Image (cartoon, rainbow, N blue to C red):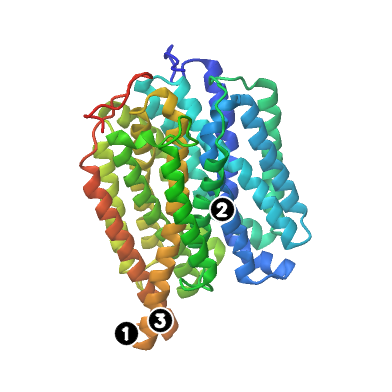
Amino acid sequence: METKDTGGTFGSKGNFFVVLVMILGVFVAILNETLLNVALSKIMGDIGISPSTAQWLSTGYLLVIGVLIPVTAFLIQRFTTRGLFLSAMGLFTIGTLVAAISPNFGMLLLGRTLQASGTGLLFPLLTNVVFATVALEKRGQAMGTIGIVITFAPAIGPTLSGIIVEHYSWRVLFYSILPIALFVIVIAYAKLKNVTETSKPRIDLPSLLLSTLGFGGIVYGFSSAGDPQGGWRSSSVLVPIVVGALSLGLFIWRQLSIPQPLLNLRTFTYRIFRISTMIMIIVMMAMFSAMMLLPIFLQNALGYTPLEAGLIMLPGGIVMGIMSPITGRLFDKFGAKWLAVVGLVLIANTLWQFAYITLATSYITIMVWNTLLMLGISMLMMPVMTNALNELPPPLYPHGTAIISTLQQVAGAVGTALLVTVMTTGQKQYLQHPQGGSEGAPVEVLALISGMKSAFLLAFGLVVAGLIISFFLRRAVPQQPEAEPTAESA
């Protein structure tokens, strides 16, 4: 359903309110994703679990989201906006309460699983609502508005978590977001209206099973490989990846063979969607290099506290929040190509600087580089995603959104695993042939720096590949609902 713009970005005050309520829900859910990382050590000590067990609080979260997102295309078409949003926020809120009061690891993991079940649905639902209600020429501005909270939440998460964990129990992390989630549910129940059309598609159970095994196996396998305690030769890594890859191949074959696919892969016949998705996958993989490796360097090499490590991300989050609506307006006026090119140049330059970081590099310098990295990401993430979906006919919006969201999760898991593997391999090689150095630091610290250099150089190479691909972008021309892909589109 394409709603004509009647003056405002979101077409009407009613549509704006719907999006505003959903943005608040997505903000809380995304904030929750980044809160726990800094608190893992406190949780391990409090409930008596090992690092390999605690890692499941993050791996399990990603696994549930990776399994659930491919089903969102069906759910968005089958159920109303209001019903889906209330269900998602309800699951997230129940999970938050369970996690807050959990006396043991099993109950805490259950809480995180319920939270992930709600989170996995919220962002695809919000994106689909925007594309159903906002006119084409205002979508960049609308997605930029959404980007303010979506990019700011992960940035303030580590800082907020560091402050809370340093002074209070880790349970306060969950108790602090519980009232916000309840507030969103009350407002949504009272005021939220339905803005998308529903139909009665049939769900293909074999596709659902193959999707679960495929995406779940790949996300789990690579997430396990990313654990320094694991390893690529472990059966807990190889078996899920092999099963996931085989299942994913069968899943793709089935989607192309049945009349009502769970995920309509016809989206990839559209050239701009295909190119944009490739760029977003590469950027997601590279993003994890800074998000994961920088805190390790700051704490393990320079001896900063978790709070100090979290604060270094804050200016970048503020810049992303400021730039999101600006880049949205620039996208509406000029398109995504040059925004993506400039953004990728900034990201590549920053990753190159990070690759040659030393113990003499100042805290402020690292903060500035990270801010430039976030600036580059803000210039391309939402514009490239908007451009990708703009080319699709409206019936494919739920499928396009689900595909992009799923591939982002897979890219995050794969990117984390690759970067951790490269970093640990670089460390081992340095320890086998230590080169010393003028810093007079312990050899373990110098090995960590050497490993980080290799990982950042890999991320740099990925971004350069994305930069080359970005020159093939052009402004998307939306197709009519009844239109089939033309030779030019394909």
Looking at the rendered image, the disc whose residue lies closer to the viewer, 3 or 2, is 2
The residue sitting at 47% across, 17% down in the picture is 1
Mark linked to residue 428: 3
Q: Residue 455, image x and y in percent?
A: 36, 67
Few, some or many residues within 10 Å of mark 1 (<14, 14–19, 20+) = few
User: Which residue matches tag 2?
Assistant: 63
Image quarter for residue 68? top right
Name which of mark 3 and mark 2 comes first in the sequence. 2
Few, some or many residues within 10 Å of mark 3 (<14, 14–19, 20+) = some
Amino acid of disc 1: Ser
Question: How far separated are the C-alphas under marks 3 and 2?
Answer: 29 Å
User: Which residue matches tag 1?
Assistant: 438
Is 343 on the left-hand or right-hand side of 409? left
Amino acid of disc 2: Leu
The residue sitting at 41% across, 83% down in the picture is 441
Image quarter for residue 384? top left
Instruction: Out of 152 and 382, give the one closest to the viewer.
Output: 382
The residue sitting at 61% across, 61% down in the picture is 56
Name which of mark 3 and mark 1 comes first in the sequence. 3
> Which secondary structure lies at badge 2?
helix
> Which secondary structure lies at badge 3?
helix
Instruction: Out of 282 and 151, give the one closest to the viewer.
Output: 282
The reply to whether dot 3 and dot 1 touch (C-beta < 8 Å) is: no
Looking at the rendered image, the disc whose residue lies closer to the viewer, 3 or 1, is 3
Q: Residue furthest top?
A: 6
Question: Is 109 placed above or below 300 here?
Answer: above
> Which secondary structure lies at badge 1?
loop
Is 236 on the left-hand or right-hand side of 301? right
Q: Residue 19, image x and y in percent?
A: 54, 26
